[in-house]
Amino acid sequence: MQHQQRSQGRLSPSSDTEDIAALLAPRLVHFAGVARTEHVTRAAQEMQVPQSTLSRSVVRLEQDLGVDLFARHGRTLSLTPAGRAFLVSVERALAEIERAADEVRADADPATGKVAFGFLHTMGAETVPGLLHTFRADHPRIRFSLVQNHGDAMLEGLRAGELDLCLTSPVPDAPDLVARRLDEQKLRLVVPADHRLAGRRRIRLAEAADETFVTLEPGYGLRRITDALCAQAGFRPRVAFEGEEAETLRGLVAAGLGVALLPPPAVPRPEVVELTVTSPRAAREIGVAWLAERPDTPPVTAFKKFLLSRRGRLLPD
């Protein structure tokens, strides 16, 4: 029997893709099962679905598509050319859905699941490796997807569902986020080793009002903190260079291109001198943030609990 176009109940070509998918999806598994056996009764037994339900589902699918997918021969069926072509795509789609389901189940597994974790570039050399090493002592098979970025970008990642948690500074205050302060990190005024202030150990930030600064780009938390501290000291910093990483700035300072307010380095550099700022108090808060009202998988819950347990001792000595 040659397939015929059906008109009754046929989906309009102008239908939205989402509407079509929502309508067809529940019937695709039934179609694939009948197509494999070419027999409704056997397919119903294998799938443990009432035969009447299976028959109605296939008929409705054909009506929705406006195409005969099967030729009927009594109790048996055979695929039409349109049915064979459709089956190839359906089996591919069902396999992809199964793969996706396996993946999300694996990511949520308490022992072997995955945590998408973001952190500042300045946390990457020592802090985050140390945290992961300690956490994995008790959870050796939990996997991590790690993202280094500036604070605003990580908060966007939380909202987009790309991150589960992030370490950031300043600690955000937003109604759609939950944030907890974990630690505080002192900032130092970094000057070249041959600078006029290099012989000092301590300095009031106002004494650097005439200096040229190198800073992170606008949008970075450390840049906002730098601008705020300089404002408290009574001046607006004269910025010569803007970068994306603290260690790049430290290199620019070493080259004599300016001074910078920076957290302590992972490894001291002899080309620069790091001065303690006595006024105003120069420090930044480090916190962990996540999206409010989003359910956590067991691996995320475990890592969140671990991070919160590190309050006051997040940073290496």
Image (cartoon, rainbow, N blue to C red):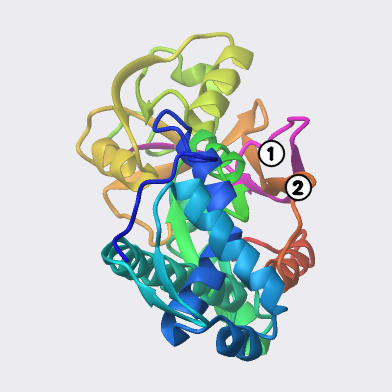
Question: Which residue is depicted at the point 55% across and 39% down?
Answer: 19
- Give coordinates of residue 139: x percent, y percent: 64, 85
Q: Which mark is residue 181?
A: 2
- Give coordinates of residue 83: x percent, y percent: 35, 65
Report the front residue among 273 and 76. Answer: 76
- Give coordinates of residue 233: x percent, y percent: 59, 15
Question: Which residue is depicted at the point 38% across and 28% down?
Answer: 215
Q: Pointer 1: what residue?
A: 171
Report the front residue among 29 and 94. Answer: 29
Circle 1 SS class: loop
Question: Which residue is depicted at the point 40% across and 39% down?
Answer: 199
Locate the C terminus by quadrant: bottom right
Say which label, 2 or 1, has the lower sequence index.
1
Are the two marked residues, 2 and 1, in contact with CB atoms closer than 8 angstroms?
yes
Name the chief secondary structure element in magenta.
strand
Q: Residues within 10 Å of mark 2 (few under 14, many from 20)?
A: some
